[in-house]
Image: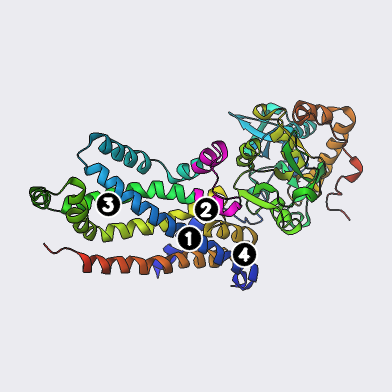
Amino acid sequence: MRMKRVAAVAMAAALSFGMAACGGDSDGESGGSGAKGIVGKAQNQKKLVIGVKADQPGLGLQTGSTYEGFDVEIAKIIAKGLGVEAGSIEWKTTVSANREPFIQQGTVDLVVATYTINDERKQKISFAGPYFIAGQDLLVKADSTLAGPEGLDGKTVCSVTGSTPAKRIQTEHPKAKLQQFDSYSKCLPLLENGQVDAVTTDDIILAGYAAQEQYAGKFKVVGKPFSTEPYGIGLKKDDKDGCEKVNEILKAAASDGSYKAAWDSTLGKSGKAAPELDTTKLTNCGSV
Amino acid sequence: MHVFADQTNLDAYVSGFLWILKLTGASAFFALVLGVLLAAFRVSPVPVLRGVGAAWVNIFRNTPLTLIVLFCYFGLFSTLGLSFSDELDLNNYWLGVVGLSVYTAAFVCEAVRSGINTVPAGQAEAARAIGLTFFQTLRIVILPQAGRAVVAPLGSVLIALCKNATIVGTIGLIEASSVMKDLINSNGDAVIPIFLVFAGTFAALLIPTGYFFGWLANRMAVKR
């Protein structure tokens, strides 16, 4: 009996290894007196833990011990608005699968990591933003004539196994050949050598890859997005004050030019002009 | 079991394991041919051939299979332009077969060489005494006896090969382990059943294989 239980625990542990732990709803105590949530924590402790991606050039990329990219700059703007200096931010690497559990368990205070706002996620956490509207697009060679997803029939497209962009190609463009890998970076040498005709995922991620030094000038983003992915800033579900405060900071960043500066110093290098931050589309932070 | 009641999921599961079987079958064939040849190299009187055999075994046995398979894709196919088929899956399949065969051949070679060592030296000397050449000795006297001694070890190599075939998923062939990852990704509520079905299918394929090779080894063994 005992052996059985040990075996079951070992198996469960082995299974959850490498997968997202679907965490519970432990409400960590944040902040001491006065305001609660991230606003309170920023006021009292003068520091924040922010989750970013570590493997997306131009958005969130870890180089040595520092992180750089558009998401990272946005996170710095928000921290500054909350009264936390950039040097006091503790960065944490998140991957797509562990973002909700990290927020729920209080491992991170905020997540700024190409985080698409959707209803399924809204049940677990709340979103401020969106600070950027991305869309699925195609990355092709600079001299390619491919003009959009309609031209994909018989062409080879590269994406990540089981990802939403890959699924969309399979269902909406079944005549396209789909080469799947475990990461987008494996697609780029193939695109360079001409074995695949296009790479597909959110346009902003593609722009980041295209802006990398070793590929500068070789690729272009087609620029006809065929889905809508509003990127938000994830935080705890009950932290309504924090959410509203982040939205205010985003509004201020749009008008004082720091949003544009964040773009220009990162993704702007791909040659794309800074987008307008449409402050009328910001979430209502859960109030009806 | 609602996951496998869905027809598309069931089809993915079946095609995933069909790829595994096809990879195993083709790679086992090429690895056996190549491995026996390498073993002959390693025991040959020609130093250059011995060197080639030893280098092959030491390099490929000590390189992670993932690296070899990735090299087949990004080195042979992507950079050098070696293409087997215009069909995406078939191309990935044959690149995988190349990687698996090259790797497994090193293990087959060492198994066969250990078998050759079980053949008493007197057998080779007697063959030489009646005037057989080196390759005649190997073909008529040594290998038939060596082969019978290594049925069980070759069975283990085959079982390892079948499981190793899942590595080909890293170059985009949607074999069983990729299908499992995908199903778990979209059915987070059924992780344990999905795992048990895939692990169980591998066990159902390989446990009988193990028993078969055990039985065959007993039957074929040269009783000395």
- Choose mark 3 or mark 4, whichever is in front: 3
Q: CA distance from mark 1 to mark 4?
A: 31 Å
Q: CA distance from mark 4 to mark 2?
A: 32 Å
Residue at the disc numbered 3: B111
SS at mark 3?
A: helix
Q: Classify the position of the N terminus of chain B by image quarter.
A: bottom right
* Label 1 or label 3, whichever comes before in sequence order: 1
SS at mark 2?
A: helix
* Label 4 or label 2, whichever comes before in sequence order: 2
Q: How many marks?
A: 4
Q: CA distance from mark 2 to mark 3?
A: 26 Å
Please rate how many residues cluster around mark 2, counting C-alpha atoms within 10 Å: few if below 14, some from 14 to 19, many from 20. Answer: many
* Label 2 or label 3, whichever comes before in sequence order: 2
Residue at the disc numbered 4: B189
**Is residue B90 left or right of B221 when viewed as pictured?**
right
Q: Can residue A239 be spotted in the picture?
A: no
Q: Residue B72: give x, y in percent of width and height.
A: 49, 43
Question: What's drawn in magenta, residue-wise?
Answer: B72-95
